[in-house]
Image (tube, rainbow, N blue to C red):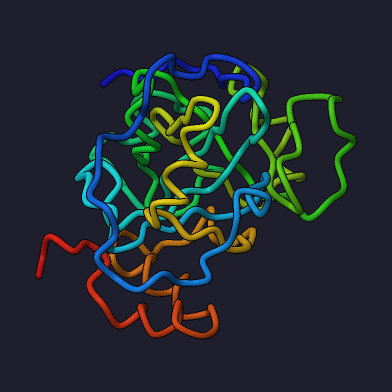
């Protein structure tokens, strides 16, 4: 895997076909897991037990863009073995631990996408930072990292992303494959990975979603 030092625009480059496989009809009671209207930049898509596709089972996806053209996000908590310093040496000092590429999804895995948090208010559309939600920004990796030393509180680089074509995510939410919950800026930079991150996100929810935090993140481990 050789990620290219450039950030894809969330408004383009979506996959023309489904990013996920077919899945079974939910075998668990229907939960209040949010609606498609709840999906927005900065929200989280949390995989439910009904989602058995190994690509997304037990995952948490941070939503970058959602419109009539489809949905774009990155899978959180999937570190790879590729060191940032080996591919993008100028950015490694700004990256949080572990300083490796995270697998953002199955689409265009040879493309690098960078997310960062910034404690300062950055005007949208000006400079190398593009606001996603709250304190989270997309970073243009073609820019000079030295110019952002004082503006960023940490960043993470992802290889690839997850994408849904128009109408696809709505169908998956209706099937009970995903819960849509509010995200927090620190979710993007969390050191938790895999089941640990899934349980942490579920554990801060209420009602039956919170109860599910004690279940296996990936139903295949049952």
Task: State the image coordinates of residue 187 (x, y, percent, origin top left).
Answer: 54, 60
Residue at 39% across, 34% down: 84
Task: State the image coordinates of residue 17 (x, y, percent, origin top left).
Answer: 38, 18
Q: Which quadrant would residue 217 be assigned to in this image?
A: bottom left
Residue at 43% across, 55% down: 178
Q: Which quadrant would residue 19 be assigned to in this image?
A: top left
Task: State the image coordinates of residue 141 (x, y, percent, origin top left).
Answer: 59, 23
Q: Looking at the image, which is closer to me, 64 or 190?
A: 64
Q: Looking at the image, which is closer to me, 219 or 193?
A: 219
Q: How many marks on residues?
A: 0
186 above or below 25?
below
Task: State the image coordinates of residue 34 (x, y, percent, origin top left).
Answer: 58, 62
Q: Looking at the image, which is closer to me, 126 or 59?
A: 59
63 above or below 218?
above
Residue at 69% across, 40% down: 137
58 above or below 7?
below
Residue at 50% across, 43% down: 156
Left or right of 220 on screen, residue 177: right
**Where is the N terminus found, in terms of image quarters?**
top left
């Amino acid at each position: 895997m050789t990620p290219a030092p450039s950030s894809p625009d969330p408004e383009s480059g979506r996959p023309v076909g489904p990013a996920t496989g077919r899945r079974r009809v939910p075998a668990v009671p229907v939960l209040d897991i949010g609606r498609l209207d709840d999906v927005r930049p900065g929200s989280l898509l949390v995989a439910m037990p009904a989602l058995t596709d190994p690509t997304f089972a037990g995952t948490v996806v941070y939503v970058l863009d959602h419109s009539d053209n489809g949905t774009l996000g990155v899978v959180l908590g999937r570190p790879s073995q590729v060191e940032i310093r080996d591919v993008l040496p100028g950015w490694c000092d700004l990256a949080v631990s572990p300083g490796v590429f995270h697998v953002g999804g199955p689409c265009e895995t040879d493309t690098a996408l960078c997310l960062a948090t910034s404690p300062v208010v950055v005007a949208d559309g000006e400079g190398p930072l593009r606001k996603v939600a709250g304190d989270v920004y997309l970073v243009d990796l073609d820019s000079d990292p030295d110019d952002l030393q004082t503006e960023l509180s940490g960043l993470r680089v992802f290889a690839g992303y997850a994408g849904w074509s128009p109408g696809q995510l709505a169908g998956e939410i209706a099937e009970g494959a995903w819960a849509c919950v509010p995200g927090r800026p620190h979710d993007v930079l969390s050191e938790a990975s895999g089941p640990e991150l899934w349980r942490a996100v579920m554990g801060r929810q209420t009602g039956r979603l919170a109860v599910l935090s004690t279940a296996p993140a990936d139903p295949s481990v049952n």
